[in-house]
Amino acid sequence: MNSLAVRARTISDRIALAAGLDVRLLGMLSVMAAVWLALHVLTGGLFLTPRNLFNLSLQVSVVGIITCGMVLVIVSRHIDLSVGSQIGFIGVLGALLQNSILPIDGGSTWWITSLAMLGAGLLIGLAQGLLVAYAGIPSFVVTLGGLLFFRNAAFYINSGVTIAPLNETFQLLGGGLDGTIGVFWSWIVCALAIAAVAFLVWRGRQRRSAHGMTRRSPGEYALLVLIWGLAIIGFTAVMNAYQQPKSDIGMGIPIPVLILIGVTIIMSAVARKHRFGRHVFAMGGNSESAELAGIDTRRLTVLVFVVMGLLCGLAAIVITARLNAGASVTGTMTELNVIAAAVIGGTSLAGGIGTVYGGIVGALIMQSLESGMILMGVPTPLQRMVLALVLIVAVWIDVVYRRARRS
Amino acid sequence: MTALVEFRDIVKTFGGVHAVQNVSLHLDEGEVLGLLGHNGAGKSTLIKILSGVFLADSGEILVNGQPAAIRSTRDAKALGIETIYQTLALSENLDAISNLFLGREIAGPLGFMNEEAMEEATGRTLARLKLRLPSLTRLVESLSGGQRQAVAIARAIHFNARVLIMDEPTAALGPEETQKVGELISQLASQGIGIILISHDIHDIFDLASRLAVMKNGRLVGTVTTSEVTKDDVLAMIIAGKMPQQGRG
C-alpha cells in the first residue's frame, strides 16, 4: 500500500474509533446512505419522507429480528434455511390457539399466545440443534428438511385456511395504527436511550481507567455520545413526524421497531460481550481448537439453534400480529432475505466472522432496495432479480475485502 | 519424592492397531522430559491420553501420587495439565486476549465478560514470561509464527500449570525464536513446572531435556539421562529400538 492510502486508512480508522464503530460498519453505513440518496432521486422525492421511513422501519423489523439469530448461526459455520417456514408454522399455531382454544377477547390471550409461540420456536430450535450437533447431520440438510416440513405442517394443521382476525391487544405487537407508543412516549424513550448511551460510555471509561487503560481522550468520549445522541433524536423525530391519516397526531415509534431495537442490543451484547458469543466465534473460526480449549461444541451448537428458534417465535408474533391473520404462506422466502441481510452486513459464510449490527444494516439495505423499487413501480420479478444480483455482489466485495486485508 | 505424573501400563488401540502398548513412564517436578520417536511411534497418542483428548483402554495415570480420572481436556486443565499442540490450536479469528482466556473467561454471574480484567491479566502474563506482542487486541491471524507461539505459551502458563506438554515446540520457529523458547523452558522448569517435550527430531530437544524417553512401535524403548548419552546413542534407540550399553537412566 502506498503512503497516501495508509494515511487515508488511519484517518478513517480514527473517525470510526471515535464513534465506537469499526471501519467496516462505517463503510456499510456509507453504502446505505448512498442507496437512500439514489432512491430518493429515482423515486422523485418519495423515499426520504417520514411516511416511507416509518413503513420501512416496520417492514424491516421481522427480517431484522431473524437476522440477529442468523448472524450467530452463520458465524458458528452453520445455516438455517427453515426460518421462513418456522414463522409460517408458528404463526398458524398462534392464530389457532387464539381462535379455537383461548377466548379471543380474553385479557390474558395475548401474552399466553406469545409465550406459546416463543415456546414453539424454542422447541423447533432444540430439535434441529440436536439433530445437527448430536446426530451429526449437516445443518444444511436438517434445516432444508425443516423448510419443507414446517411449511407443509403450517398448511396441514388448519387445512390451509387462513385464520383471522386475532386478539386486539395481540395486534398491537405488529405495529399498525394503534401499535405505536405515540409522540410523548417516543420522546421519553429517546431521552432514556441517550441517557443510557452516556451512562455506558462513562462506565466503560471508568472501567478502563480502573485498569490503567485509556484509549480515548475526553473529547472523543463526548463526540461518541454526541454522534449517538443525534442519531437517536433524528430517528425519533422521523417516527413522530409521520402523522396518522387525516389528523395531525404523530405516530411515534412502532412497537415492533422497539422489539427489534431491543433484540439487536441484547444479541449484540451476547455476541461481543458474553462468554456464549465468544465461544460461538471460536467454534466458527476453528471448531477443533475450540474443543481443545475445553468448549463443549455440541452443546454450544444446540444453544445457537435454540436462540435462532426463539427469535423465529418472536418474529412470528410480530408478523402474525401485523397481518392480523395466521396464514400458512407467511414468511415464504424470508430465509433468503435474512441470509442475504447477514452476508451483506459482513457475516462470512466461512464462519467465525460477523456482527449483529452489521446484519441489521444489511437488512435495512435489502429492505430499502425492495421498498424503493416498489415506489418506482419496478415489476416484482425484476425486483427479485436485482436483489439476487445485490447478494452476489455483496459476497464478492466481502471476498475482495478479506483478500486485501490478509496481504 | 512422589512423581508429578506417572503413567502405569497404558494401553491404547485404534481398530486393532496397538498405538500405545503397556507404557509406564514418570515425570518429576521441575523436570524437562524429552519424548522421542518416529512419526507413528505412539508419542502423540500417549500425550493425548494425558491431555484428555483420548481415553486409555487400560492402565492408569497418577498425578501427585493420586489416581486421576482424565476424561476430557477440561479434566486435564483442572489438574493443571496444559498442552501446546504443534498446530498451537489457536482461534485465528480472535485476538490474543480471547485466545488466552478461551473457555475460561473472567465473567460476571450472568456470563458477561470483564474484558478490561482479561486484557490486564494477559499483559501481565506476557510480561512475566518476557514475551512481546505488537498488540493484544490484534487478531491472531495477523501475528507471526513466534508471536503465535507466545500466545499459546502464555495461555498454557496463565492458569498455574503444573505440567506443560509441548508438541514439536520449535519445529516452526527460526533460530532466534527457538533460542528464546529454549530459555523460557528452562525458566519454567526452574519454577517447578514439569515439562514434556515431544519431537521426532533429536536435535530439536537434546539440549533442552534433562531426561529422554524413546518410543518405537507403540512401546517404550527406555529412558536415559541426557548427560550420560550421546546423540548417536539416542538415534540408535529411535531407529533400532536398542538401549545403549551404558548410561541407563
Image: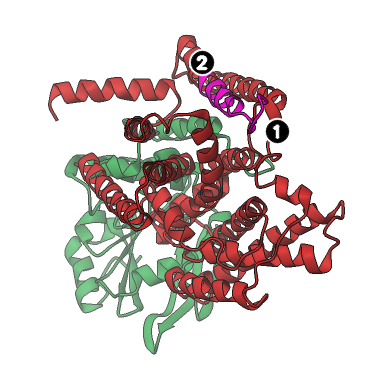
Chain colours: A red, B green
Mark 1 vs mark 2, CA separation in Å: 25 Å
* In-front residue for pair B41/A200: A200
Residue drawn at (67%, 75%), measured in percent from left and top? A158
Give the label, 1 or 2, closer to the camera: 1
Which chain letter matches label 2?
A
Q: Where is residue A163 in the image (x, y as percent from the top left)?
A: 69, 65
Residue drawn at (47%, 75%), measured in percent from left and top? A137
Which residue in the rendered view is the most extreme toward the front?
A: A246
The magenta segment = A230-249
Residue A226's mark?
Answer: 2
Identify the main secondary structure in magenta: helix
Which chain letter matches label 1?
A
B25 sits to left or right of B159? left
Q: Position of residue A118 (x, y in %)?
A: 69, 58
B142 sits to left or right of A330? left
Q: Is disc 1 in the same subunit as disc 2?
A: yes
Pointers 1 and 2 in contact (C-beta within 8 Å): no
User: Three-letter amino acid code at disc 2?
Assistant: Leu
Task: Count residues near mark 1 (Cα–Cα under 10 Å), then give few for <14, some for 14-19, many for 20+.
Answer: some
